[in-house]
Amino acid sequence: MTGMKQEFGYFLKNAKFRAALGLTLLLSYGYAIATTRVSIDSLEGDRYIGTGGVMLSTGRFGMNLWAAVLGYGRAEPSYAFGIDLLAALLLALAAVSFCALLRKAAQDRISMFGYGLFACLFVSYPLMNEIWEYSGANVCVCGGYLLDAAALNLLWDARQPGVPWRGRALRMCAAALCLMVVCSSYESLAAVFVLAVFALLTLEQLLAAERPRLAAVLTEGLWYAAALVGGLCLRVLVTSGIHLVLPQAAANGATEILWAFYPFVYLAKLLVKGILINYALRGCFYLPIAELAVAALVFIVLVIALAVRKKRPLLLLTGAGTLFSLVLLSFVQGRYSPYRTCQVFALFVALAGLAVYELLRRAAARRAVLLGSVQLLAVLLCLHQAMYLNHLLAVDYQRSEQEAAVVRTLGTELVRDYGTDKPVVLVGRYTLGENITRYTTADPMQHPLYRFFREHTSWESGDTVKYVETNCNSVLNWSVTAFSEVDDVYGQAAEHLFRYYGFALDMTHSAALHEQAQTYADAHHLPGYPRAGAIVDCGDYVLVNLQ
C-alpha cells in the first residue's frame, strides 16, 4: 500500500501534471457530467442489472458488482451525474496507474511532460464517446482500465528480485481477481491487458543492457498470460455458480463467436474487409480512427527502425503482438469489433504518442526552440481530442433533447385524444434532424481517398457513411423493436421511454400485431409524425407512424 501511495504521489504531487490531467478531463467530460441524456439502454437497468438478470446470466456479473459497490443502483438517468463523474475519476486514476507502470518499466527515463502527454491522450481519446452513451457501462470500462493497470503493476512487482514466492503468489492471485472483474464487466478490456503486456515487453527490450533471449521474453509473457487465464477461469467458476442458483435470462448482444457457424475463408474475407474499412478508411471522417491509422503506421516504422539499429529482432515479435492486440477481439469473434468495444485503441494511441515524443525529445535535447515546438504540437493534439470528444457528447445531449420534445408532444396528443385504454403501436422510423446527422455521417464521395476506394471496390455501398456507430443514435427508433429478437414482444423499451416522460401508455404488443400495423401504414401510405394523419385509431389499438 505504501508503494502504491508513493507511485501515485510521484505524479499527483506534481502541479503541472495535475493541472494538465484535470483540465483535459474537464474539457472532455465536463459538459457530459453536468447534463443528463436518455440514450439507448438508459432506462433498461432493471433488465440488465436488476430483476431481469441479463448480466448475471451472460457472465457479466462484474457490471452488477460495480453497481453494488459504487451505489448507482440500476444506472437510471437520475444517477447520471454520479455515474459520469465516477467514470471520469476512474479513468484519470487508470491513466496515473499506467504512468506508474511505465515509470518502473522505463527505469525513470521518461520525462514528466511525456507522462502528462500519455495521460492526457489516453483520457481524451474521442472514441470514448461511443461507450459513454450506455449508462453505467462507462464506469465498467473506466474501472476496467484501472483494474488492468493494477493487475499489471502487481505482476510487475512480483517479478522483481527479492520478492519471496509467497509474495509472488499473493500478487498473482490479486491480479487474477482484478482480471476476473475486468473480464466479467466488459470483455474487450482483456485485449487492453494483452496490448499493455506486449508494450511492456517491447519497452524492456529497448532498455535492456544486453540483447534479450527468446526464452526470457516468452517466460515473462507467460507470467502475464497466467494471470489472464486465471482471471478467465475465475469468471467461468463464478458464472457457473450463479447459474446453479439463478435461472438464466434470455439476452441480446453481439457476443457470439462466429467461426463455428460460417466457413473460415468466407468469414476471414469479411473480417479483413471490415477491419480495413472501419479501422483505417473511416479515418477520412472520424478523428479517433485517423489517429489510430497514423499511430499504427508510425509504430511499424519505429519498431522496424529500432530493431535494425539495435540489432534486436525480437522487437519485431513483440511489436507484431502489440499490433495484433488491436484486432484481437475481432479475430476471436470472427467479426470486426464495433467502436464501443475498441478500448484498446486509446491505450495504443497514447503509447505511440509517448514514444514519438520521447524520441523527438532526445533528438532535440539541445535545441530549445525545436523541443518547445514539439511540446506545443503535443498540447494542441490533446486539446483537439478533448474538444472533439466534448463536441460529440454535446451532440448526443442535443439528440436527447430533440427526441424528448417529440415524446412529450406525441404523448400529450395520445393521452388527450385517445386515452390510455388501448395499446399504442409505433411503426416506421423517426428521422433525426440534420443538425445531429451532419456530425455523425458523411458522403463518402466527398473525400478523395474514400471516393477512390468506392470506385475501385464493391466492398461497401450506400450514399452516406455512418462513422459514429453508437453515439447520437435515435432512442425512439431503437425503442420500437428493442428486445423483440429475444422474447418476440415489441414496444417494451418504448413504454419505458414514454413513462419516463410522464405518459402511462400501454405500448407492449405481439409481433403479429406489429406486422399488422406496419402493413396498414404501408397500404394506406400514412404520413410520418407529426404530420396530420400519422396517428390512426384502428379499433383495438392506436397506430402511430413515425415516418
Image: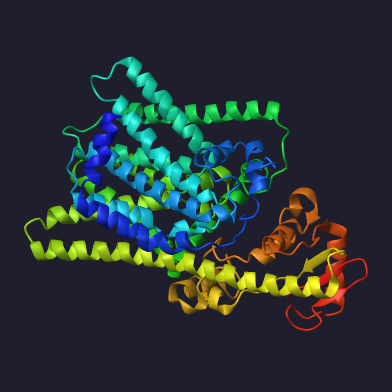
Asked whether residue 430 is in view, the answer is: no
Tell me which colouring the rendered structure shows. Answer: rainbow
Q: Nearer the viewer, residue 443 or 154?
A: 154
Query: Relative to 279, does residue 458 appear above or below in the rendering?
Result: below
Query: Relative to 479, does residue 255 appear above or below in the rendering?
Result: above
Quarter-wise, where is residue 124 in the image?
Answer: bottom left
Residue 478 location, x and y as percent?
A: 68, 62
Which residue appears at 69% of the width and 27% of the height? Answer: 245
Query: Relative to 62, does residue 460 appear above or below in the rendering?
Result: below
User: Which quarter shows the N terminus?
Assistant: top left
Q: Nearer the viewer, residue 421 or 224?
A: 421
Residue 94 location, x and y as percent?
A: 37, 44
In the picture, measured across the screen, residue 42 lies left or right of residue 456, that is right
Residue 172 location, x and y as percent?
A: 39, 24
Q: Residue furthest bottom?
A: 532
Q: How many marks?
A: 0
In the picture, measured across the screen, residue 484 lies left or right of residue 150, that is right
In the picture, measured across the screen, residue 193 lies left or right of residue 379, that is right
Which residue appears at 39% of the width and 52% of the height? Answer: 346
Which residue appears at 83% of the width and 75% of the height? Answer: 417
User: Which quarter shows the C terminus?
Assistant: bottom right
Asked whether residue 541 is in view, the answer is: yes
Q: Nearer the viewer, residue 35 or 217?
A: 35
Q: Residue furthest right?
A: 539
Quarter-wise, where is residue 31 in the image?
Answer: bottom left
Residue 226 location, x and y as percent?
A: 43, 27
Q: Nearer the viewer, residue 275 or 76?
A: 76
Query: Relative to 274, does residue 250 appear above or below in the rendering?
Result: above
Which residue appears at 31% of the width and 62% of the height? Answer: 382
